[in-house]
């Protein structure tokens, strides 16, 4: 078996399309680095880029190496699943997390993060350790708009799932303004 690595995007009409794909033996830093180097050649130094992925170390390491100037966000849904272990899956904590994550104004973000700190210090500390620019719309270094999750990758995954090869889709890649590839 192997893995299928795919970068997906949304066009101006909100339609999902695969940008690039490749086959690898496993999902690891070496595979992701190879894939993202190929992707980098194909997009030829976009003006701006926002990459959204889960927290898989292989993806993270490869993105840092190949797209060091690109903004890298963490999927809000995958992060929430990881945070649940810190708060015994409490709905009130998850609600505060999502409110902070999706806030459009810094004042609102600060308000929800303050409430989160009082409600569940472990989740609050974990979010600060990750870095607010990685999960928060308002603190994102690029316009993240609606690209808060890897749902478009998951949509591609469910569409192409055939029970044979395990398929993994890298990230929502949104091209915006100037980054150079290494």
Image: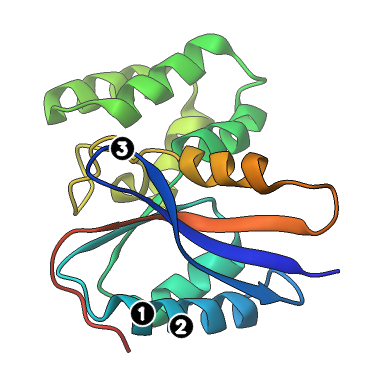
What residue would you read off at disc 3?
14
Placement of 30 over or under 161, stated as above or below: below
Res. 137 in view: yes
Give above or below for 159 relative to 66. Answer: above
Q: Residues within 10 Å of mark 1 (few under 14, many from 20)?
A: few
Q: Residue furthest top?
A: 92
Q: x, y (%) of residue 49?
A: 25, 63
**169 or 107: nearer the viewer:** 169
The mark that comes first in sequence, 3 or 2, is 3
Q: Residue at x 42, y 81 (%)?
A: 65
* CA distance for labels 2 and 1: 6 Å
**Circles 2, 1 touching at the beta carbon (< 8 Å):** yes
Query: In this view of the protein, which residue sits in the foreground, 86 or 46?
Result: 46
State the residue position of label 2. 38
Q: Earlier in the sequence, mark 3 or mark 1?
A: 3
Residue under label 1: 42
């Amino acid at each position: 078996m192997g893995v299928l690595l795919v970068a997906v995007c949304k066009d101006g009409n909100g339609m999902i399309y695969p940008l690039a794909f490749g086959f690898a033996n496993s999902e690891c830093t070496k595979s992701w680095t190879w894939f993202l180097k190929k992707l980098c050649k194909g997009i030829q130094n976009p003006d701006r880029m926002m990459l959204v992925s889960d927290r898989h170390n292989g993806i993270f390491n490869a993105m840092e190496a190949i797209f060091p100037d690109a903004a890298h966000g963490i999927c809000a849904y995958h992060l929430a699943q990881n945070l649940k272990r810190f708060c015994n899956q409490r709905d009130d904590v998850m609600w505060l997390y999502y409110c902070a994550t999706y806030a459009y104004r810094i004042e609102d973000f600060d308000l929800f993060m303050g409430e989160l700190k009082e409600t569940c210090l472990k989740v609050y500390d974990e979010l600060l350790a990750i870095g607010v620019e990685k999960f928060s719309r308002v603190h994102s270094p690029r316009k993240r708009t609606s690209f808060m999750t890897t749902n478009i990758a998951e949509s591609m995954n469910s569409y192409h799932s055939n029970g044979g090869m395990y398929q993994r889709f890298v990230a929502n890649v949104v091209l915006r303004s100037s980054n150079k590839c290494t």
